[in-house]
Image (cartoon, grey):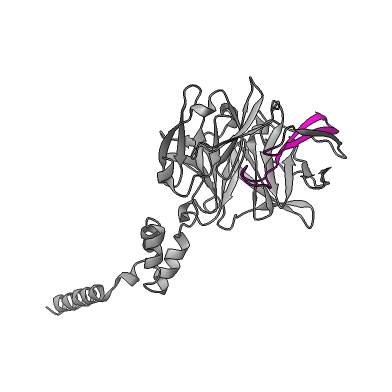
Amino acid sequence: MVAMDSVRVTTNCKREKLELQTWSDLPTELLELIFCRLTLEDNIHASVVCKRWHTAAISVRVVNQSPWLMYFPRCGNFYELYDPAQRKTYSLELPELYGSRVCYTKDGWLLLFRPRTHRVFFFNPFTKQVIKLPRFELTYQIVAFSAPPTSTSCIVFTVKHISPTIVAISNCHPGATEWVTVNYQNRLPFVSSIWNKIVFCSGLFYCLSLTGWLGVFDPVERTWNVLVVPPPKCPENFFAKNWWKGKFMSEHNGDILVIYTCCNGNPIIFKLNQSQMMWKEMKTLDGVTLFASFLSSHSRTDLPGIMRNSIYFSKVRFFGKRCISYSLDDCRYYPRKQCHDWGEQDPFENIWIEPPEDLSISL
């Protein structure tokens, strides 16, 4: 009888404690799971409830839109765009791109080339705006541009090695009547690739050679220099079949980042230490998300919590339900046990592009 009374008292105490618990007592992990599904406005409203909710809401708050993966069809005019944050696919009919090949993307603009006519032009797939450049043969050059073509600071830059010690650099800008090409002598061997490893950062174009040497072009001073910086240390067995496709290059807030991948190991990320002129391996991205593709790569902050401190690659599995990514927090790929042989993928098949803020205008 005494034992039953003791059980009854214990049960009543537990019931009273449960009745006294409030929403603010929810575990942090559960709060973050709930808040990451809210809109930005609802997330802000929830963050003012109490200190615990504020901390949880801030940790998963989404301020930026992630890039989308744009697919170029082998035939036809319908282009698919995959949103990795929402895991949704959109379609656009773009007959304006027929017969063209994508070269680079930045700020929602595509830079394209028509091999048959040597026509080079910018195209915004969301506004359908076209900006033409003078004709030019973009066959073996790597190419990038510095700003949207609607900006007066937009410069298009290409580089092609003539020999290991000589490169031909060409540049142009919207409104120009011709391209300007100058040959430069290298102090160190520099062999470029048609798979772009090039970024514009702090007013300079940075180009990574096939073997990891870094070339820098100043469009104002019109100078070219191959930095005396030993190439990043490659992963074991990196120099194997299709090894040249396993490198990606991006920039974030003035930092130059290089990603090395291989099919039998985890990616390795290097950041250029510009004061010591050496590459430093990074174990964390401090919440930054990288989006890597052959022709251009991007970086983002303030994305959904599950996407942070990760690299998203230009491959989608499970019928569009999952983009291949690598989490630096978990030290593993998602989905697990996926094949990462980049030799199977056509470099011109897809590219990351920034979507417009107002999707209702274009989709």
Q: Residue at x 37, y 55 (%)?
A: 37
Residue 139 image position (x, y, % from top left): 69, 25
* Relative depth, front residue between 224 and 333: 224
Query: Residue 135 falls in which quadrant of the image?
Result: top right
Query: Residue 234 falls in which quadrant of the image?
Result: top right
Looking at this view, name the residue that lies furthest to the top: 116
Range drawn in magenta:
146-175
Looking at this view, name the residue that lies furthest to the left: 1
Q: How many marks?
A: 0
Residue 172 image position (x, y, % from top left): 72, 37
Does the image show residue 29? Answer: no
Query: Residue 39 falls in which quadrant of the image?
Result: bottom left
- Residue 160 part of the magenta segment: yes
User: Does 187 sit left or right of 56 as displayed?
Assistant: right
- Residue 20 part of the magenta segment: no
User: Does 149 sit left or right of 141 as displayed?
Assistant: left
User: Does 184 sit left or right of 33 as displayed?
Assistant: right
* Relative depth, front residue between 152 and 306: 152
Residue 69 image position (x, y, % from top left): 50, 38
Q: Is residue 47 above or below residue 263?
A: below
Does the image show residue 203? Answer: yes
Q: Quadrant of the C terminus?
A: top left
Q: Quadrant of the N terminus?
A: bottom left
Residue 186 image position (x, y, % from top left): 86, 38
